[in-house]
Amino acid sequence: MRRPQLIAFTVVQSVLVLVFAAYLRTNEKPSLWVMSILLFVTSLFFNALQPMAHALLNDVVDGAERGAAFGLFNLVGEIGAVVSPALGGTLFDHYGSWTHAVYIDGALMLAGAGLYVLIRENTSRA
């Protein structure tokens, strides 16, 4: 059962991102050490998510449709990679801080965890 672990890691990563945003918001001059540690720990969970998501995707999609499913999965990720810098930069220019962009990231990750809850795993394959 891959889905519960994927959901758990996504929620933990989301909470860590929100903690990072709250730290940025509450500290006028945030510590580079604290930010580095938060970013490192957060990235451990984030970097574990993609292989978990790929494994779950492999399990729930029929073999004939896997190429299209993985292509769509990567397309959505790449769209995020294109939109994120522009949106983050615009928010920084408007507010003078990265805090809003980081809060949006955490909220999107929590929404993703909610979408993972809707996936039905095929338990007959093992």
Image (tube, rainbow, N blue to C red):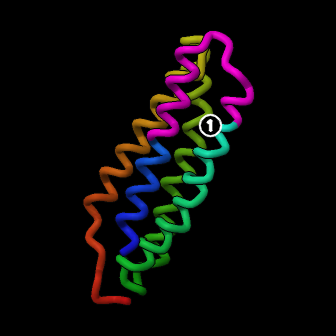
Residue 3 in view of the camera: yes
Q: Position of residue 62 (x, y in %)?
A: 36, 83
Q: Secondary structure at mark 1?
A: helix
Q: Position of residue 36 (x, y in %)?
A: 70, 35
Foreground pick, 95 / 15: 15
Foreground pick, 92 / 107: 107
* Quadrant location, the C terminus: bottom left
Q: Does the magenta segment cover residue 24?
A: yes
Which of the 4 image quadrants contains residue 28? top right
Q: Amino acid at mark 1?
A: Leu
Foreground pick, 55 / 89: 55
> What residue is shown with label 1?
38
Which of the 4 image quadrants contains residue 97? top right
Residue at point 38%, 57% (across, down): 7
Residue extent of the magenta highlight: 15-36
**Circle 1 Cα neighbour tier, 10 Å, few/some/many (<14 / 14–19 / ≥20):** some
Q: Is 117 located above or below residue 99 in the figure?
A: below
Residue at point 36%, 75% (across, down): 1
Predominant SS of the magenta segment = helix
Q: Is 90 located above or below residue 56 in the figure?
A: above
Q: Does the magenta segment cover residue 126?
A: no
Q: Position of residue 79 (x, y in %)?
A: 53, 48
Which of the 4 image quadrants contains residue 65? bottom left
Residue at point 74%, 26% (across, down): 32
Q: Position of residue 45 (x, y in %)?
A: 55, 53
Residue at point 45%, 42% (across, down): 14
